Amino acid sequence: MPRHRLVLPADRELLPFHPVYSVTHLSGLDNPADGSWKAWKLPGAGPRTYAVYVDEKDKVWLTDFGANAIVRFDPTTEKFDSFPSDMASANVRQLAGRPGETWGGESGTNRLVRIQTVA
């Protein structure tokens, strides 16, 4: 189990996937019936998670400060998708969302980026 972790707020307890994150791994309750957990190593050579957000479709979004990217994890397929910034030294950190959109803050470029999650 990773040394540093953050449990999401209690209002997320009704979701089938309860993420916990650390610097290098994403962990979640895999089987609520038996209480078993799984952990997934974040992609890349030196991942550094900064923020996490779970959308309305239970996809887990996080900012990877080390990769300068926003990353999406699908707990059903257990796959990661990375959305790297197009700007050097963007310092992708903050993260928020609403239905159909995920927003990331790039403190190194003073801009917000939006990823539309619906067509």
Image (cartoon, rainbow, N blue to C red):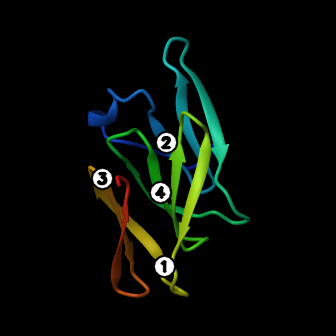
> Which residue in the structure is indicated by mark 3?
100
Q: Residues within 10 Å of mark 4 (few under 14, many from 20)?
A: many
Quick check: marks 1 and 3 in contact, CB under 8 Å?
no
Relative height, residue 45 to residue 112 (above, below): above
Q: Which element carries disc 2, helix, strand or loop?
A: strand
Q: For residue 20, which numbered disc appears in the image?
A: 2
* Mark pair 4, 2: CA separation: 11 Å
Image quadrant in which the N terminus is located: top right
Residue 40 x/y as whole percent: 65, 43
> Which residue in the structure is indicated by mark 1?
91
The three-letter amino acid code for the residue at tag 2 is Val
Q: For residue 62, which numbered disc appears in the image?
A: 4
* Mark pair 4, 1: CA separation: 13 Å
**Which label's residue is closer to the chain start, 4 or 1?**
4
Q: Residues within 10 Å of mark 3 (few under 14, many from 20)?
A: few
Q: Residues within 10 Å of mark 2 (few under 14, many from 20)?
A: some
Residue at 46 percent of width and 73 percent of height? 92
